[in-house]
Amino acid sequence: MKFGFRIPSFTKRIAARTSVSRIIRHNLGFKAPRGLGWITNPKKFVYNKVYNKTSWGCMVTLIFLLGIPMLIIVIFVRMV
């Protein structure tokens, strides 16, 4: 299991959009409604659930790193 930043893979994104199983599933109408991924692929559902709870995007870190200095500046300005 990976912890930390999510690094997007463009090759996996393209492969997922052009897979034969996806084309068949979408053309025949065998799509499961949103939220029922645990029925179609329970292993992937559990992995994604853990991954989404333990990883964070790069914007969260960026906001955190920029937010602390801004907070210190605001406090310092109010004291003067």
Image: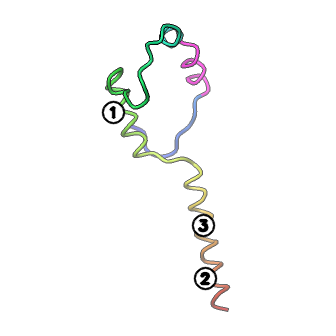
Task: Give the x, y percent position of residue 63.
Answer: 60, 59
Residues in magenta, as a range: 10-19
Residue where numbered disc 3 is placed:
67
Q: Residue at x 36, y 30 (%)?
A: 45
Relative to 12, 76 lies left or right? right
Quote the CA–CA distance across marks 1 and 3: 33 Å
Q: Quadrant of residue 51?
A: top left
Task: Assess whether residue 11 is covered by the magenta stretch.
Answer: yes
| 69 is higher (above) or lower (below) than 27 | below
| 17 is higher (above) or lower (below) than 20 | below
Task: Assess whether residue 8 is covered by the magenta stretch.
Answer: no
Q: Residue at x 42, y 25 (%)?
A: 33
Mark 1 vs mark 3: which is more N-terminal?
Answer: 1
Query: Disc 2 residue type?
Result: Ile
Residue where numbered disc 2 is placed:
75
- For the N terminus, the quadrant is top left
- For the C terminus, the quadrant is bottom right
- Give neighbour class at mark 1: few <14, some 14-19, many 20+ (Cα, 10 Å): few
Closer to us: 9 or 30 = 30
- Give neighbour class at mark 2: few <14, some 14-19, many 20+ (Cα, 10 Å): few
Closer to us: 36 or 72 = 36
| 57 is higher (above) or lower (below) than 67 | above
